Amino acid sequence: MTTDAQAPEGYDPHDYPPFAVTVDLCIFTVRDGALKVLLIERADDPYAGAWALPGGFVDIDEDIADAAWRELAEETGVEQFAGHLEQLGTYGKPGRDPRMRVVSVAHVAFAPNLPEPTAGSDARNARWWDVSDLDLPGLTGGNDDGDGPELAFDHARILADGVDRVAAKLEYTPLATAFVAEQFTLGELQHVYEAVWGTHLDRSNFRRWVKGTEGFVRPTTGTERRLTGGAGRPAALYTAVGDGPKTLTPPLMRPEGARTVKGTP
Amino acid sequence: MTTDAQAPEGYDPHDYPPFAVTVDLCIFTVRDGALKVLLIERADDPYAGAWALPGGFVDIDEDIADAAWRELAEETGVEQFAGHLEQLGTYGKPGRDPRMRVVSVAHVAFAPNLPEPTAGSDARNARWWDVSDLDLPGLTGGNDDGDGPELAFDHARILADGVDRVAAKLEYTPLATAFVAEQFTLGELQHVYEAVWGTHLDRSNFRRWVKGTEGFVRPTTGTERRLTGGAGRPAALYTAVGDGPKTLTPPLMRPEGARTVKGTP
DNA sequence: ACAAAAGTGTTATGCGTACACCCATGG
DNA sequence: CCATGGGTGTACGCATAACACTTTTGT
């Protein structure tokens, strides 16, 4: 076989190997000072009882990105999603699904603090998992001690890559703002970095970097309103610059000991 | 539809939308001080006469990565490929191929200086194109003046993403060594950076960075043997550290004016 | 002798790091 | 009045950028 460039004229599409194409989603959020991911408990075989990334089939006339957005809305129950969604990579080893040949286009989503899973449309169980409670291959900062839940298919591999992607993206993009509300304090933004990287950052230097980086945040007139009591001076509120640049210069280098990146594609 | 997790037990695979899955390759090399990409002239409709990325169908029982390596060997005529191959992203808009629903998993390959295209296995025309002679969307440093060749399908979009990927990877990985021979001079290595980024680097500072970065290059005893005459002191030869790290610390920041990265996934 | 490219050294600027200190609020 | 978190300032050290200089070869 050569290339699609060379397909003969009078062909039948089914002469070519038929694949099923799915989208799988790593939906991340930051809550309670930790990076969380939304997983779904499988009801049926294969991998019944195991936890899996939410996802589903792509329709034959549907764009892949549209399918990912559709699944995201279905799983989170939110129609106006305020976060960020991007493609992660494609996983298509033969045998990864024992039933048929499936190629999965994985995505990562950065979600602001969402309510408890708004359980998916059907009866499955769904919940946020602390990423550090999962057994992910080749990731420092996780606990490979083997008492995490079983993950279905190759979803441990996908999720490890997804965590890597999120950690890397915070360095040189303004996407940390996708994890917080429309109005946020610089302390909240710093907590995002610390939760995702599993490190501590110097408050003063973080503030200087954020405020000195063009196209990242813009101050608002408002100030923090604290619902539950708690001491401390109320913080000023900021907003993400809407049409900001896609990359930040300079990037914020994460300190040694942060969650490892094996090789960021 | 929900997720593959929920597929019923007694199903027929053909009940699910059948996609054709292909791999497309951006095979880059550095020659004559410029970044080049291997393109193939299409013989048949659609896009007959247009230039396209090499690629082909994935077999139903074949790993996607294996298919990419297979196509790479076929197109370059090299069986022992010394460079680097990685997945770029997946492009699957309905209608991108007018004949059927095709999902293409694009890859980028970093190739050392290869002979003239060793023309593909069949009668098609194939050649290296200077990247700056192509009309790629959203890329600074190219010449969007519209006198480049017509590119088939969405290959201009894919190629733009591929150029971005290559430029970004040089910053924080040792993969620049994939563009040169097994033994190389630091001057040759610097030429790779300058060709890909379209900038000039300070020789002294580049040398200090390369030699001071752990796990990048290792000196050999040999010294440069110049085939064709040419003045100048013969350079010492270096080798890539085989089991070096996947990421370099610190990265080499490219100067302002280098080929733009819109958002490196 | 000259050109060309490799190799070495020097200096100043700027930025990241670390840390100290003040402000505002709740209990 | 004390604890807590927000906000600001500053001194130090090192990495980088810019540039000058020496060495080794071919013509």
Image: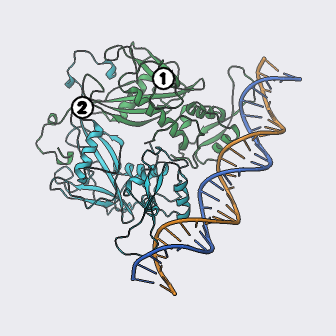
Chain colours: A cyan, B green, C blue, D orange
Instruction: Judge left or right: residue A32 versus residue A78.
Output: right
Q: Is residue A236 above or below residue B224?
A: below
Question: Quick one: label 1 or label 2, which is nearer the N terminus?
Answer: 2
Nearer to me, A232 or A129: A232
The residue that disc 1 covers is B134
Q: Which residue appears at 64% of the width and 34% of the height?
A: B200
Label 1 environment density (alpha carbons within 10 Å; few <14, some 14–19, many ≥20): many
Q: Is the residue under label 2 in contact with that under label 1 (CB below 8 Å)?
A: no
Question: Above or below — where is B148 with respect to B184?
Answer: above
Most foreground residue, A118 or B69 = A118
Residue at 20% across / 54% down in the picture? A120
Q: Which residue is mark 2?
A: B19
Dot 2: few (<14), some (14–19), or many (≥20) neighbours within 10 Å? Answer: many
In x, y percent, where is residue B30? 55, 27
| Picture mark count | 2
- x and y, in percent, of residue A174 in the image: 45, 50
Tell me if B146 is positioned left or right of A91 in this view.
right
